[in-house]
Image (cartoon, rainbow, N blue to C red):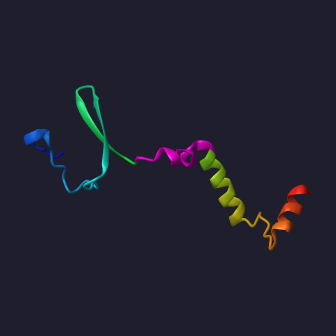
Amino acid sequence: MELVKVASGRRIVLPKSLDIKEGDILELEEKEGEIVLKPVAVIPKSQQWFWQKEWLGKEKEASKDLKEGRYKDFKKVGDLLKDLKD
């Protein structure tokens, strides 16, 4: 446990031993009389689709297919389109 002092403007200095750098974003929650700080990554709204559970599952499946050689390689777009029709 380490003590920190509240400075002017209600600021606190976090210990260097924490892997928190200037500019990082923290979630602050008051919970049963305690203050809990959690580092968070903010994802732009336009990128949120990628981090959805369903999409990540499909990414994992595709990576496994690639690793295990379950894919086709096409030299020409026409060959791809023909394969898709078949």
Q: Quadrant of residue 65?
A: bottom right
Return the x and y of residue 53 as percentages of the image width and height. 58, 43
Return the x and y of residue 41 as percentages of the image width and height. 40, 48
Q: Quadrant of the C terminus?
A: bottom right
Return the x and y of residue 70 as percentages of the image width and height. 77, 63
Residue drawn at point x = 16 percent, y = 46 percent:
2
Residue drawn at point x = 31 percent, y = 44 percent:
26
The image shows residue 83, relative to residue 55, as above or below, that is below
The image shows residue 59, relative to residue 74, as above or below, that is above
View extreme (right): residue: 86
Residue drawn at point x = 13 percent, y = 44 percent:
3
View extreme (top): residue: 32
The answer to whether residue 48 is seen in the rendering is: yes
Return the x and y of residue 33 as percentages of the image width and height. 22, 26
Q: Quadrant of the N terminus?
A: top left
The answer to whether residue 6 is seen in the rendering is: no
Secondary structure predominantly adopted by residues drawn in magenta: helix
Q: Quadrant of residue 60?
A: bottom right
Query: What are the residue bounds of the magenta stretch?
Result: 42-54
On screen, residue 81 versus residue 9, left or right, reads right
Asked if residue 86 lies in the magenta stretch, the reply is: no
On screen, residue 17 versus residue 64, left or right, reads left
The image shows residue 52, relative to residue 63, as above or below, that is above
Residue drawn at point x = 80 percent, y = 70 percent:
74
* Towards the viewer: 27 or 42: 42
View extreme (left): residue: 8
On screen, residue 4 versus residue 63, left or right, reads left
